[in-house]
């Protein structure tokens, strides 16, 4: 199966409109419709339910959409890695405030490794690192758990406490320690990290937050309370924000992730370095 029919299929599946998909692809609608019919004939399944007013994915189409995205990402990633192989360097994706305070130590120790390559830091947005790895735009990433591990391997680097970020003058700042229940934050025994991550993601989506400064401004204004890794709190003091211990909060785990198909000795050396540095600081 060629990649072009899959790209056409994904465009239609995401738009659920042949005209919009054709415009997105830069082609006209008739050849797009023919390409989809040919793909259905090749696979022997119906991918879309079509009426005069709507287009919907069939169960077979829903399965193919997930697989097609993965396949196209893999093709794109292979091309990116081949292009970058001509000029050896290692791209490390990091959120600006998401390195546990370890990035400089990791890079300094890595530079002394025999298999080290020059490192380019790719600053990423909120939870962008996994997609950068899958698309071949980064070789490794420092990222807090949990995250989408599809197609990725990972090793923990360091584990640290989470602190509550509260607006100055909040009633809870009268205490040295607070509980999740006091903060109105969820706590589940089986998926505590995931539960808190979803709560933070909901805040990020609701307020269209781009960076930590915006998040802390919302705390300062009294719009939200949230939890942050201790290393972040130590590096970002603000007059209008106070931090408190939360003994029943799950710890924050910083990991280093890389594509499962990676065979790069330089990447392997970076992973070893990161876990060694993190262990020494733990």
Image: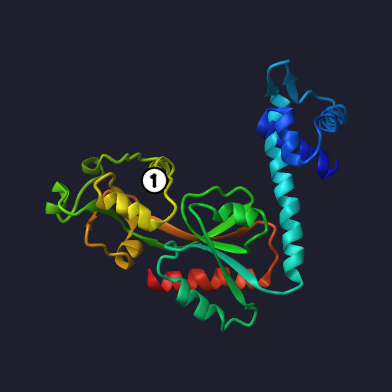
Tell me residue 165's x, y (percent). 27, 53
Q: Nearer the viewer, residue 76 or 116?
A: 76
Image coordinates of residue 250 in percent, x first then y, are 34, 50
Q: Residue at x 54, y 53 (%)?
A: 128
- What x and y, as percent, mark residue 48? 74, 24
Say which residue appears at 48% left-offset and 52% top-offset: 126
For residue 100, above or below residue 88: above
Res 64 seen here: no
- Disc 1 packing (10 Å; few <14; some 14–19; many ≥20): some
- Residue 198 visible: yes
In the rendered image, which residue does mark 1 sit on? Answer: 200
Q: How many marks?
A: 1
Image quarter where the N terminus lies is top right
Image height of 240 relative to 234, above or below = above
Residue 92 percent across, percent down from the top left = 57, 66
Which type of secondary structure does the marked residue at label 1 adopt? helix
Task: Name the foreground residue: 188 vs 121.
Answer: 121
The answer to which image quadrant residue 56 occupies is top right
**Does residue 136 appear left or right of residue 109 in this picture?**
right
Look at 55% across and 58% down and name the residue there: 154
Tell me what residue is drawn at x 31 percent, y 62 percent. 233
Q: Residue furthest left?
A: 174
Q: Nearer the viewer, residue 133 or 154?
A: 133
Q: Where on the picture, by quarter, is residue 137?
A: bottom right
């Amino acid at each position: 199966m060629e990649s072009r029919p899959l790209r056409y299929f994904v465009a239609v599946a995401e738009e659920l409109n042949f005209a919009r998909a054709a415009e997105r692809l830069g082609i006209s609608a008739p050849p797009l419709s023919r390409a989809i019919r040919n793909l259905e004939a090749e696979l022997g399944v119906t991918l879309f339910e079509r009426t005069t007013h709507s287009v919907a994915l069939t169960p077979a189409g829903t399965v193919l959409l997930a697989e097609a995205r993965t396949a196209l990402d893999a093709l794109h990633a292979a091309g990116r890695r081949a292009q970058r192989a001509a000029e050896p360097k290692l791209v490390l994706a990091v959120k600006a405030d998401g390195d546990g305070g370890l990035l400089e130590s990791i890079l300094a120790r890595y530079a002394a490794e025999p298999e080290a390559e020059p490192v380019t830091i790719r600053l990423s947005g909120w939870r962008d690192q996994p997609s950068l790895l899958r698309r071949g735009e980064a070789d490794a990433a420092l990222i807090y758990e949990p995250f989408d591990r599809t197609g990725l391997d990972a090793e923990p680097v360091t584990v640290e406490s989470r602190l509550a970020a509260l607006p100055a003058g909040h009633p809870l700042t009268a205490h040295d320690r607070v509980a999740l229940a006091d903060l109105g934050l969820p706590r589940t025994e089986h998926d505590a990290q995931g539960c808190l991550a979803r709560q933070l993601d909901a805040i990020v989506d609701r307020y269209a937050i781009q960076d930590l400064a915006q998040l802390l401004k919302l705390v300062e204004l009294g719009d939200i309370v949230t939890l942050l890794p201790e290393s972040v709190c130590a590096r970002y003091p603000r007059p209008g924000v106070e931090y408190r211990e939360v003994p029943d909060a799950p710890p924050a785990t910083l990991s280093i992730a890389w594509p499962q198909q990676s065979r790069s000795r330089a990447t392997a050396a970076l992973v070893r370095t990161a876990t060694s540095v993190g262990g020494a600081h733990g």
